[in-house]
Amino acid sequence: MYIQDHIAILNAYWEFNKRSGIEKMDFARENFLGIKTLKEMGDLKRQLLQVMSARCSVTNDRRCASRVYLSQRLSEISLRTPQERPGLAAPASN
């Protein structure tokens, strides 16, 4: 898998995630995306953040806390449009 594939998947997840209700379903159908898979990606992201946060509070590790903070900030950035995400916009096609 090429880096462009990962960025495309990430952009699709972000676009799906910033919608609500029926808009999510419509977006997934219009773009031939698996609704269940996109929802599971969100669940996995939340679980990973919870595990990281719990580990940091137990170990009092500053680096760990920084990583959790960064992950949470990336989640906030995910609600922005691709043009607003520095360095993560899909490559221009020629």
Image (cartoon, rainbow, N blue to C red):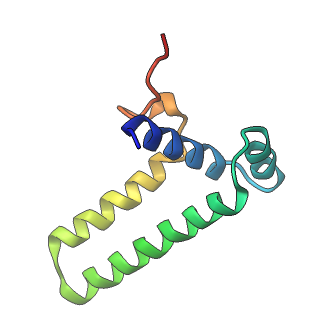
**Left-right relation of 51 to 27:** left
Q: Is residue 47 above or below residue 7?
A: below
Give the position of the N terminus as an image quadrant. top left
**Left-right relation of 81 to 72:** right
Furthest toward the top, the residue is 94
Q: Position of residue 26 (x, y in %)?
A: 81, 45
Furthest toward the front, the residue is 1
Q: Position of residue 81 (x, y in %)?
A: 55, 35
Q: Is residue 94 above or below residue 20?
A: above
| Rendered image quadrant of residue 56 | bottom left
Q: Is residue 6 above or below residue 39?
A: above
Residue at the image point whose x is 52% and y is 45% from the top: 9
| Rendered image quadrant of residue 29 | top right
Q: Position of residue 69 (x, y in %)?
A: 32, 63
Residue at the image point whose x is 28% and y is 83% from the top: 55
Residue at the image point whose x is 22% and y is 71% from the top: 64
| Rendered image quadrant of residue 63 | bottom left
Q: How many marks?
A: 0
**Left-right relation of 61 to 73:** left
Furthest toward the bottom, the residue is 58
Q: Position of residue 44 (x, y in %)?
A: 51, 70
Asked whether 84 or 35 is in front, the reply is 35
**Left-right relation of 16 to 60:** right
Asked whether 56 or 30 is in front, the reply is 30
Residue at the image point whose x is 48% and y is 10% from the top: 94
Q: Is residue 78 above or below residue 62?
A: above
